Image (cartoon, helix red, strand yellow):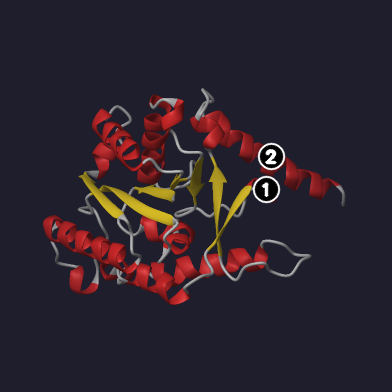
Amino acid sequence: MMKNLCIAAHHDDVEIMAYAAIAKCYGSEDNQFTAVVVTDGSGSLRNGIYAGFTDKEMMEIREREQKAAAEIGRYNALFLLAEKSNAAKDPKNRDVTEKIKKIILETAPDTIYTHNLADKHDTHVAVAMHVIRALRELPIEKRPSRVIAMEVWRSLDWLCDEDKVVEDTSPYPNTASALIGVFDSQVSSKRYDLAAIGRRLANATFYQSNNTDDFESVSYGMDITELVNSNISPVDFINKHIDKFKNEVQRRLEVYL
């Protein structure tokens, strides 16, 4: 049994960034998918029929949407931590870190998916940092064999190809659309359903220029297992990737000067 755990900041982040893992576990007896959503949804965008909803009403609708997604995706379990966004963004908030640590111990995942360190959403980065802290505080034998940081609010297309974790999101396209479409309160404000699926298709097409496509749809991730299992600074870790990208662009340009 291969156990996959996704730890995300918001309702629908799981479905956007970890669909490959969801698809791999969908209807499988050999794979298991569990989701964690850290925040409570009170700060969600609201438009159309949701424009007049209170924070409490938005929390309720976001919870219903997330539970519906878990049913559609046949998740093994769903944890809703219901933290305020400001609380999640507080690096000194031990409560969030401890809750994540407890879930990791309870679920014993082989692979963890979370947000990437170059994401441009503050809450996403904050949640990723809670995950890193929680994992570093666990005994090495209790940590997963892989930790993958996925794209949501910033694509990882910029990563050098050899550093991309290419996650196949091709299977069950109708399920992929349904999983994001169920979050009607958010899709009514921004077309996340079209954008997320479109990015996956674009990733597959533009991944390699000189070869035919191996997949119809992919998401990109960054392997941060080394970061979790070391004392490397997260800033130094991401800067290494940024510098590598800068050097790759520079070398390509210099050939034609």
Residue 63 placement: quadrant: bottom left
Compared with 117, 220 (above or below) is: below
Percent position of residue 7, x then y: 36, 46
For image coordinates 51% across by 70% down, the residue present is: 171
Q: Residue placed farthest to the bottom in the image?
A: 174
Q: Kindly identify which residue carries mark 1.
A: 160
Percent position of residue 185, x then y: 25, 68
Q: Kindly identify which residue carries mark 2.
A: 244
For image coordinates 46% across by 68% down, the residue present is: 195
Helix, strand or loop at mark 1: loop
Percent position of residue 231, x then y: 51, 22
Alpha carbons under labels 1 and 2: distance apart? 7 Å
Give the total number of marks visible in the rendering.
2
Residue 138 placement: quadrant: top left
Residue 72 placement: quadrant: bottom left
Q: Is residue 257 visible?
A: no
Whether residue 56 sits left or right of residue 116 in the image: it is left
The numbered mark, 1 or 2, whose residue comes first in the sequence reads 1
Compared with 127, 54 (above or below) is: below
Q: Is residue 29 visible?
A: yes
Tag 1–tag 2 contact (CB < 8 Å) = yes
Percent position of residue 102, x then y: 28, 35
Helix, strand or loop at mark 2: helix
The amino acid beneath tag 2 is Lys
Q: Residues within 10 Å of mark 2 (few under 14, many from 20)?
A: some
For image coordinates 28% across by 39% down, the residue present is: 88
For image coordinates 18% across by 60% down, the residue present is: 58
The amino acid beneath tag 1 is Cys
